[in-house]
């Protein structure tokens, strides 16, 4: 990259870190061009009565959690092609998130999946995260797989299982996950169930729902007073005839029955084709029941692709509703849970995550450009053309200078992927960890 040829690649052999001066030198080489683009956009927006600095400030405050399972190369039903230098331990996963956060300053937390990432000694894990300016987001339970030495199988379900002993085992696992989360300073438990059926007649829909509700009630009772439980839904996979929590309505129903500490978690890939996700978001926010998001993208189903790679306009429309809902509820962005949930089958996971975070910030910035008063007036006058034009004008604005400025002001890089590649981060990880490492996760 131009202007970066003299940057040294200084990595500590024990803990890899990108030093601030490396980021600053990298930014110096790009600043003139960036500043010209930013000033030009600032003037354009100013003519519309939009203050660029206000949007930049909101972008600086937006943080996206990185899931511990997304730091290695993902897999498919047919195979997994592991990358090189994948993290071999929870500590190395935290270090990888630290690298991301150093580059974009928008990845300030990590979400753990238990039992893939059970901390050994808690305090050293907390100290490591703190040293990298990271916090622990929601902890995730796993009853969609059988673990080594597990007494009873989840082949035919977990919280919904016909066998009370299997349900008890699944409940106890979730309570164990809560305890790990408490020790780490997390404030939420995220639950996704693969429970369902493959064939008609296999499952009694009502009993499966009731069993799941009773199990969730036990878990809910174990939540600390200041905790939340996020109930995720999925239309299909791995069961294709039915799933117990198959859509946002069933998830909302569970949450309403559980109580005020339960909210619905929306995964962008967990919908039937052509579902109007932005309408779902608006409804959940209207009811005060949106927990947050698992961001990804898809062409067919739960593809777990890079955020914004397939449907960037849909992502923008979702953020239009998110911003309106937050304003209506007078809630800041940090009162919701934002997390990436992706599987990187053919990309370097860290580069993919950098792309995803940028796409999220771009969609947010575009949505912040929408003139809400004019949009509401167009709606009240049934001016469909103008309403569409207002949205698409915002979407078609190149807001990348705003995103870059937010990263720069926060101490991050103006071009995170370029700096990542220039410093040879993946090669450094390969040299330290080896070629044949495989991170825990899907």
Image: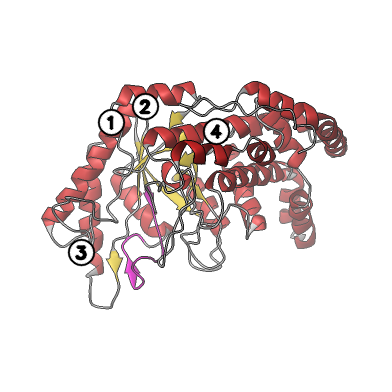
Q: How is the image coloured?
A: secondary structure
Q: Which residue is mark 3?
A: 207
Q: Earlier in the sequence, mark 1 or mark 2?
A: 1
State yes or no: residue 152 in magenta.
Answer: no
Q: Work out whether 352 lies above or below 200.
A: above
Q: Is there CB contact under 8 Å for labels 3 and 4?
A: no
**Residue hosting label 4:** 99
Residue that appears at 79% across and 61% down: 385
First reached walking from the N terminus: tag 2 or tag 3? 2
Residue plotted at (57% across, 43% down) = 325
**Mark 4 packing: few (<14 Cα in 10 Å), some, or many (20+)?**
many
User: To which residue does mark 2 refer?
Assistant: 125
Residue 332 visible within the image: no
Q: Are marks 1 and 2 in contact (CB under 8 Å)?
A: yes
Q: State the extent of the magenta-drawn residues as a range.
A: 231-245
| Alpha carbons under labels 4 and 1: distance apart | 22 Å
Q: Is residue 58 left or right of residue 245?
A: right
**Looking at the picture, how far across and down is residue 76, in whole percent?**
43, 63
**Residue located beneath label 1 in the image:** 120
């Amino acid at each position: 990259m131009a202007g970066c040829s003299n940057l040294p690649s200084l990595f500590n052999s024990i803990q890899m870190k990108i030093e601030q001066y490396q980021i600053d030198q990298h930014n110096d080489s790009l600043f003139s061009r960036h500043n010209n683009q930013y000033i030009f956009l600032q003037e354009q927006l100013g003519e519309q009565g939009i203050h660029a600095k206000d949007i930049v400030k909101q972008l600086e405050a937006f943080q996206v959690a990185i899931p511990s399972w997304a730091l290695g190369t993902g897999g498919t039903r047919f195979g997994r092609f592991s990358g090189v230098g994948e993290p071999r331990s929870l500590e190395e996963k935290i270090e990888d998130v630290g690298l991301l956060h150093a580059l974009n300053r928008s990845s300030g937390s990590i979400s753990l999946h238990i039992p893939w990432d059970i901390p050994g000694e808690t305090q050293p894990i907390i100290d490591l995260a703190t040293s990298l300016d990271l916090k622990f987001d929601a902890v995730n339970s796993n009853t969609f797989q059988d673990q080594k030495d597990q007494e009873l199988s989840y082949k035919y379900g977990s919280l919904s299982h016909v066998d009370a002993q299997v349900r008890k085992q699944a409940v106890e696992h979730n309570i164990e996950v809560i305890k790990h989360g408490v020790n780490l300073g997390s404030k939420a438990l995220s639950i996704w169930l693969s429970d369902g059926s493959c064939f008609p007649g296999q499952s009694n829909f009502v009993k499966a729902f009731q069993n799941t509700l009773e199990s969730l009630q036990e878990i809910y009772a174990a939540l600390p007073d200041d905790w939340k439980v996020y109930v995720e839904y999925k239309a299909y996979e791995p069961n294709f005839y039915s799933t117990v929590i198959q859509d946002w309505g069933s998830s909302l129903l569970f949450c309403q029955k559980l109580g005020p500490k339960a909210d619905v978690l929306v995964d962008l890939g967990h919908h039937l084709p052509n579902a109007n996700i932005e309408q779902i978001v608006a409804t959940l926010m209207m009811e005060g029941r949106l927990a947050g998001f698992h961001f990804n993208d898809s062409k067919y189903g739960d593809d777990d692709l890079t955020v914004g790679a397939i449907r960037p306009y849909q992502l923008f429309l979702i953020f239009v509703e998110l911003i309106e809902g937050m304003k209506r509820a007078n809630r800041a962005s940090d009162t919701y849970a934002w997390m990436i949930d992706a599987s990187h089958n053919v990309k370097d996971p860290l580069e993919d995550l950098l792309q995803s975070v940028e796409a999220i910030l771009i969609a947010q910035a575009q949505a912040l450009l929408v003139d809400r008063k004019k949009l509401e007036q167009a709606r009240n006058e049934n001016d469909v053309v103008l309403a569409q034009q207002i949205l698409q004008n915002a979407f078609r604005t190149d807001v990348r200078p705003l995103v870059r400025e937010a990263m720069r002001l926060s101490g991050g890089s103006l071009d995170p992927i370029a700096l990542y590649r220039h410093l040879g981060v993946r090669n450094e990880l390969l040299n330290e960890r080896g070629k044949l490492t495989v991170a825990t996760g899907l």
